[in-house]
Image (cartoon, helix red, strand yellow):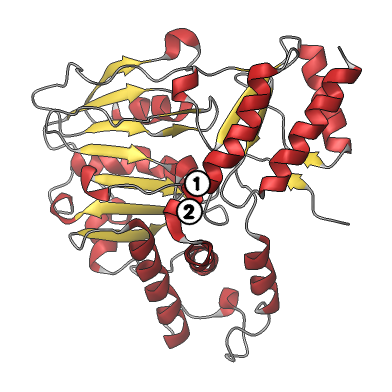
Amino acid sequence: MSRVYNFSAGPAVLPEEVLKEAAAEMLDYNGTGMSVMEMSHRSKAFEEIIKTAEQDIRDLMKIPDNYKVLFLQGGASQQFAMIPMNLMKNKVADYIVTGQWAKKAWQEASKYGKANKIASSEDETFSYIPDCSDLPISEDADYVYICENNTIYGTKFKTLPNTKGKTLVADVSSCFLSEPVDVSKYGIIYGGVQKNVGPAGMVIVIIREDLITDDVLEGTPTMLKFKTHADADSLYNTPPAYNIYICGKVFKWLKKMGGLEKMKELNEKKAKILYDFLDESKLFKGTVRKEDRSLMNVPFVTGDADMDAKFVKEAKEAGFENLKGHRSVGGMRASIYNAMPIEGVEKLVEFMKKFEKENA
């Protein structure tokens, strides 16, 4: 069986050479005579894996020294609660709701204090990013929260919101490591790794040190305090060891590819191929306002549910997997993360042209 072109939104495509390396080391990692899956997280070998992974992501993102990198379990969704538990000192936070995940984060924060929805694009099925240059930021807000790239709807913040001096917290799960980012603009920048970085089951949290304190909401479990994990260098309990190992390999691959500047260039090139076709197609059309389009997730429709279903079915038969859109929006969605090769996008467009001709 040959590899398919996997356009899944997550868990998603990983670089083939990373998978091959992991396969080669499955029974014997680096002469230890065992797999990373079997090894103690307190061992010398694993200590080297986690330290190297942290250094490599620091290099890639140019993370300032006053930020901690935490490798945590629970995925991005656990952060929806962990962030207010740790940051809501005044019990007030402002949320910009641009999709399902931002909405879920806002709903979760509402359990811990007053979560204000200060901007939203729900009125047009989250197909655009609202103007965030002059928002009604709450005077006593502990932070302002965004989901920077909206996986389901295919939108992306091209300009960060003006938080008027308040701490910015961003979920970057689906654009993680896809382009350079100025970490110093955020208090917390975090992402579930299963879209662009590694296997499911882990979130990477990059957090400014002044936000790591013992002063958390009463009743916050030990495991949900940032300080617990920061003090223990992500080794308070057994971490998601195999995830850290695979992510570490992906960081090495990204460095080899030329870093995040190079990835941005490649990602822009891939996205342009698909968006250019959507803009001229008579059958298919993109669903997002042009200036807010994501480089990672590209939703599109034919305008006819039966035709959409026919396309997804025939695409699958032709070796293009996971093109069905999220159940909340329907249509199709191609997720073209870092590891999706350019020829995957070219072949998809070729197939779409053929399908359009046959179904005109």
Question: Percent from the top left, x then y, of residue 35?
Answer: 61, 79
The residue nearer to you, when weighing 354 against 175, is 354
The percent position of residue 155, horizontal first and vertical second, equals: 47, 26
Judging depth in this view, the residue of 244 and 54 nearest the camera is 54
Query: Which part of the image, by quadrant, shows the C terminus?
Result: top right
Q: Residues within 10 Å of mark 1 (few under 14, many from 20)?
A: few
Q: Which residue is found at the position 72% from the left and 46% from the top?
A: 343
Q: Relative to residue 163, is residue 209 depicted above or below?
A: below
Vertical order, 173 against 332 (above or below): below
Q: Name the residue under label 1.
A: 265
The amino acid sitting under disc 1 is Glu
- Residues under numbered marks 1 and 2 in contact, where contact means CB atoms less than 8 Å apart: yes
**C-alpha span from label 1 to label 2:** 5 Å
Count up the numbered dots: 2
Q: What residue is rendered at 20% in x and 17% in y?
A: 135
> Picture coordinates of residue 328 (x, y %)?
60, 20
Left or right of 51? Residue 200 is right
Q: Which amino acid does label 2 sit on?
A: Lys
Q: Mark 2 points at which residue?
A: 262
Identify whether 137 is placed above or below 185.
Answer: above
Frontmost residue, 110 versus 196: 196
Residue at (29%, 62%) from the top-left corner? 229
Residue 73 seen in the current view: no
